[in-house]
Image: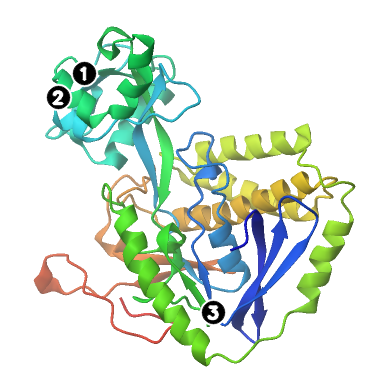
Amino acid sequence: MLENVLVVELLVDDGRVVGALGLRRDRAELVVVRAGATVLAAGGAGRLFSVTSNPVDVTGGGYALALQAGAVLRDMEFIQFYPWRLIRPFGSSRVPVQPSTFVSGARLYNAAGERFMEAYDPVRKEAATRDVSARGIFDQIRFGKAVDGGVVLDVSAVPDDVFRHENSKVVERLDPHGIDYRTIPLIIAPEAHFVMGGVLIDEWGGSSRSGLYACGETAGGVHGGNRLNSNAVPETQVFGHRAGQAAARYAGTAAPGAVDDGSLRRWTHRLAAIRDEGSEVSPELKAALTAFRDAMWLGLGIVRTEGGLSKAAVQAKATEEHAAGMRPETLGELVAATELGHLAAAAGASAASALFRTESRAAHYREDHPDTDPAWVATVAYASGRVWRRPLAVDPDEAGELPRPAARASGADEFVE
C-alpha cells in the first residue's frame, strides 16, 4: 500500500504494461512499481467541471494513463449529471436530494412559477430520468429563469416522515440549528456526477493492452449510456473482483518486463527542477484550472453543440500541451500540473467522442442533433487522438436488448459485443 502517491505514467515494454511510475505527494521522490499485471481503478473525471459531486482528486487519471499506454477508451461522450444538488441553504458542502423524493410528490418551479418539468416529460414530470431532469433544470438557468442560480424545490406535498427518511443529510444539517426545512427556500441545481465511458474492457476487465485491466468508473460500457441509480457500487464489486482474478492469473504467467529509462529520466528531470517540496500552488495555475473547468462546463456539459464541443476539444488539447510544458516550482505545482494534464486528456477524449456521435442518446444531448438515431446503435471508441465507430451486434428478436459479450482473451485487440 503506497499512500499519497500520484501515478504519473504506466510503464510499457514491447506493447505490454509492466508497472507504473508514481510521484509522492508529500516529498520529492519517484516510486517505480514493477508488476506482472496492472489494474486501473482510479474513479472518473468529475473534476472536469466547475460543479461536481466528485472529490478533488478525481481528475481523470485512469483515462489519461490508459491512453498514454496505448489502450482504447469507449463511450466517453456519456457523462451523467446529477440534477438535484441543494445549493441553498447549503453552499460548498454537497447535499443531494434523493430521486425518490420526486416520486413522493416533490415539485420543481422556475422563477416564473412554472412547473417546467411537465414540458420535458409530461408523464413522469419531476420523476424523469437524470439526463432529462438535469437538462430541464439547466435550461431554466441558461435561459434566465433561475432562482439564485437554480430552481425552487417544493416539498410541501411530501410527508415529513418520508422526507426525513429519504433525505437524512438535509435534516441532519438543519435540525441541530433549529431550522425547519419546510419553512426555508430550497434551491437545487445540477452537478457533474459519473462517467459511463472509460477503458474498453472485456468481461474480465481486460483492456486492449496486454497486462492492463480496469474496473469501476475507470472502465467503460457496463452502464450503457446512462447509469441507473445505485448501480455504481455493485459494479465495483463485480468487475473489481473479476479484474483482480484475471490480473492475478495473467501475472502468474507473465515474464518480467523492462522499465523504460526514458520515462524515468524525464520525470527525474521534472522533479529536479522544482525549488522546494511545499504544497503551494501559484495563483496562475489555480486560475488556469478554474478557467479550464468553466470552459468544460460550457462546452462539454449538459447541453452540447458542434460549436461548443469544438471549442472544448481545442481547449483540451491546448491545456494538455500547456500542462506538459509547465515548469513547476514546487512539488504542489508539479502534482497540480500533472492532474491538469490528466483532466485535459480525459476532456479531449470526451469532446472528440461527443462530436463524433451526431445524435442525442441517454446522457449525451446534442442540441443541434436532438433526436435519437437508430443508425447510432454503436460504440464510439477513442485512442491516440483517433475516434471511430464500433458496431454492436443486435438480435432483432430481442426487442433492442443487446446480447452478452462473447468471451475473448484478455488483451485482445478487438472485442465482440
* Residue 384 image position (x, y, % from top left): 59, 69
User: First in sequence: mark 2 or mark 3?
Assistant: 3
- Please tell me which residue lies in front, 237 or 394: 237
Disc 2 residue type? Gly
Specify which label sits upstream in the sequence, 1 or 2: 2
Classed neighbour count for the residue bearing mark 1: other residues with Cα under 10 Å, few (<14), some (14–19), many (≥20): some
The residue at 36%/64% (across/down) is 221
Q: Is residue 251 above or below residue 199?
A: below
Residue designated by label 2? 105
Residue 120 x %, y %: 23, 33
Residue that carries the numbered disc 1 in the rendered image: 155
Q: Quadrant of the C terminus?
A: bottom left
Residue that carries the numbered disc 3 in the rendered image: 37
> What's the CA distance linking mark 2 and mark 3?
50 Å
Does the image show residue 385?
Answer: no
What amino acid is labelled 3 in the image? Ala
Q: Quadrant of residue 34?
A: bottom right
